[in-house]
Image (cartoon, grey):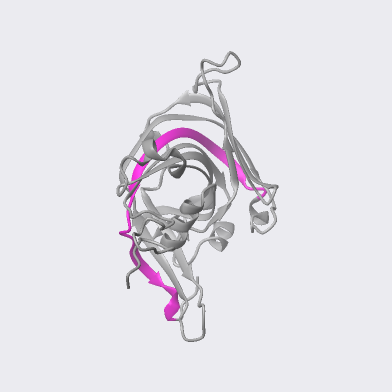
Amino acid sequence: MELNGFSNPLSPSGTASLVEPPPHHIGADAIRVVFRAGRDLARRYLPEPLEPVEDGLGFAYVADMVKVSADEPDQAFLSPRRTQYGEGIVGFYCRLGERAGRFSTFIWVTQDWSMGFGSIMGWGKKIGEVWRTHLNPYNPAMGEVGPGARLAGEVTRLGRPVLRVGIEIERAITPAEMPGYGDRGYLLRHQPSPGPEIPAATQLLELQLRDVRTGDVFTGRPHLEIHDAENEDLALLRDCEPIAAYAYKQGWTTDTDARLVHDYSAGGRA
């Protein structure tokens, strides 16, 4: 075959691929609200054999993101539009045996290449609209990010609200004081069958993020709104209790080195 590239669409030179070859170096300027769903409810959103952590803790997250592919190290300078995107997540902290991690149940992003990478890896992403508070200390109406500041993030899709998170910052903390449940993500990779002779594939993967660094961490009073939005399945989570909020910056490297931990295609179920 004469066509090349990491992902569709393949082309003669490979430069038409929606997703550049990993590793991808990622940075996030994030707001995260932790909520209590209860173990029974959290279990309904987790694929087996993942188990909820205590109290069925989940998280809602909105962030400004920046991505640079190792294949194009000057990307942030040459093509900023191909490196910046917004992201919103609703997910749950979980365990697989003794290994703690996170499962991102629903993800909304603002760029097609981020959604495309999700399909490859097993993140359930949709295109949405994402906004986050930007504070500029030189703006006469604004101050710096710190105690007393208020930050919010919103996700909408199909013209309707999906998610809103907020924090009223009270104090700075160390990265170690922000619960993370490890730097491990669990991914559900589902490929439906396109024809009777082609099998579907549903697999639970484990991905360890690399080179994780966290800083500028603040905690404070949480705010959370989860809406019963069209074409979503969030209604059960509308009344979950927010218990903590964090604003922080984080960076890591994502590569295609996920590990298969459960294959539902052999007769199991998600």
Q: Position of residue 44 (x, y in %)?
A: 57, 62
Rendered image quadrant of residue 251: top left
Q: Position of residue 246 (x, y in %)?
A: 49, 34
Image: magenta residue range? 238-266
Q: Residue at x 56, y 16 (%)?
A: 139
- Give the vertical position of 116 relative to 180 (above or below): below
| Horizontal relation, residue 264 to residue 253: left or right | right
Q: Could one spot residue 55 in this view of the protein?
A: no
Q: Residue at x 68, y 55 (%)?
A: 235
Q: Residue at x 53, y 26 (%)?
A: 169
- Give the vertical position of 101 relative to 79 (above or below): below
Q: Residue at x 59, y 33 (%)?
A: 152
Count of numbered labels shown in the rendering: 0
Q: Could one spot residue 178 in this view of the protein?
A: yes
Q: Position of residue 176 (x, y in %)?
A: 36, 35
Residue extending farthest to the bottom is 197
Question: Where is the N terminus found, in terms of image quarters?
Answer: bottom left
- Give the vertical position of 94 relative to 141 (above or below): below
| Horizontal relation, residue 153 to residue 259: left or right | right
Find out whether residue 172 is within the magenta segment.
Answer: no
Q: Nearer the viewer, residue 83 or 253?
A: 83
Q: Position of residue 53 (x, y in %)?
A: 46, 53
| Horizontal relation, residue 37 to residue 246: left or right | right
The secondary structure making up most of the magenta span is strand
Residue extending farthest to the top is 140
Q: Nearer the viewer, residue 139 or 210?
A: 139
Q: Nearer the viewer, residue 241 or 86?
A: 86
Find out whether residue 245 is within the magenta segment.
Answer: yes
